[in-house]
Image (cartoon, rainbow, N blue to C red):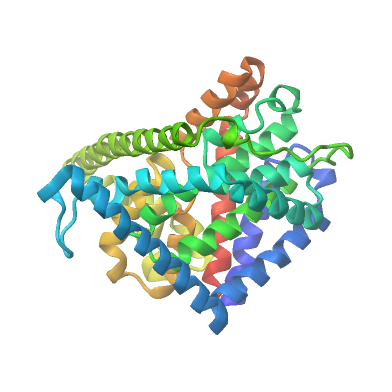
Amino acid sequence: MNFVFLLTGLALVFLIGWLISSDRKHIRFASIGRLFVLQLIISFICLNTSGGIKALKGISGFFNWLMQQAAGGVDFVFGGLMIKPGGSVFFLNVLMPIVFISALVGILNYIKVLPFIIKWTGWAINKVSEMGELESYFAVSTAILGQPEVFLTVKEQIPKLTEQRLYTICASAMSAVSAAMLASYMKMVPGKFVVVAVFLNILSALIISCIVNPYVPQKNDQLVQVKKGNQEPFFQVLGNYIIDGFQLAITVGAMLIGFVALVTFLNNTFLALINVSFTELIGYIFAPIAFLMGVPQQDIVKAGSLMATKLITNEFVAMGTLHGMAAGLSAKANAIISAYLVSFANFGTVGIITGSIKSISAKQGGYVAKFSLKLLLGATLASILTGTIVGMYF
């Protein structure tokens, strides 16, 4: 039965991708096949072998340990506001640690660890996918550095990119999540699904681009390097990353206040008018998609509601909702929806990406604005593909 739902999920992704494809005659089936096989290998090792499960547990444990270290700085500043285990102040316990994780990312970038990982992982992915060195580099770097910062690493290339190549890197930016966010995600959904989704999403974005936006990359592409952090003094770089992390936490917090309040308003309004909440209503709309992904029938409305919530608001709102209802969902539904939620595919991110590109090149920003809805749909298909693959093992 799991294999059947794998096929239905894949069929759904391919059908929608084919319908919106810019060049249906030249869909890159060979690259899709190689990338999909790599996804199956990664997911099998991570979720179905003792070594992989142990490794995921270790990674999750490491990020939990980082959150504990971050609590030292948060507690120093906010004092007695830190809540004991069992309680929760979302801003302090989930968002403020982003500042510490961002600082670590800055240090690893400064001492050339991240550039090394990005360069050679991108090189390996390009050998498998033949998508182009720039595209493969960007798919990896956006999963580590996040956006909008990642666009600065290719700002010299962005004005020269064709619309097709621009679509691919923007789709990767929407499908990935930054390393600074991982520990915060793991406070709301099981860490193993966060880690697996990060790996799979890199490949899912490239697969969708092979369907929606097929093209043959230029042979003379040069692999782009991450900007050298140590061109500036160490503590200046570290301070910049800390400030960036704090601004990110504040931005996410502000968005959560607005979006959660808006969803609450809509739920109460719909309940008063038609005795059905807004989230339940949109859950019915997305329920068929959840079913084709493999979500058990009794959970498809709740899963569909979470999928729609993420699309309309953001992944934090949906993860917070999932955290409260996870006990009432089956293990398979939890696995699928947890993996699905680990990406930036939502309406707000479209605006962030468009603004980031426009700040570098007004012309290219106009192109991104033109295909923004297609970009959002492609990134959502990548999340569906990732969730479908994860669900096969439960």
Q: Position of residue 40 (x, y in %)?
A: 66, 70
The one nearer the camera, 276 or 124, is 124
Q: Along the horizontal axis of the image, is 237 left or right of 211?
A: left
Q: Position of residue 82 (x, y in %)?
A: 16, 52
Task: Say which quarter of the image contains residue 369.
Answer: top right
The one nearer the camera, 381 or 51, is 51
Q: Along the horizontal axis of the image, is 123 left or right of 258?
A: right
Q: Residue at x 51, y 57 (%)?
A: 289
View extreme (top): residue = 362
The one nearer the camera, 97 or 380, is 97
Q: Along the horizontal axis of the image, is 135 left or right of 369?
A: right
Q: Is residue 278 above or below residue 193?
A: above
Q: Residue at x 74, y 55 (%)?
A: 125
Q: Residue at x 16, y 42 (%)?
A: 272
Task: Say which quarter of the image contains residue 278.
Answer: top left
Q: Position of residue 379 (x, y in %)?
A: 57, 45
Q: Is residue 104 above or below residue 362?
A: below
Q: Along the horizontal axis of the image, is 349 left or right of 327?
A: right
The N terminus appears in which quarter of the rendering? bottom right
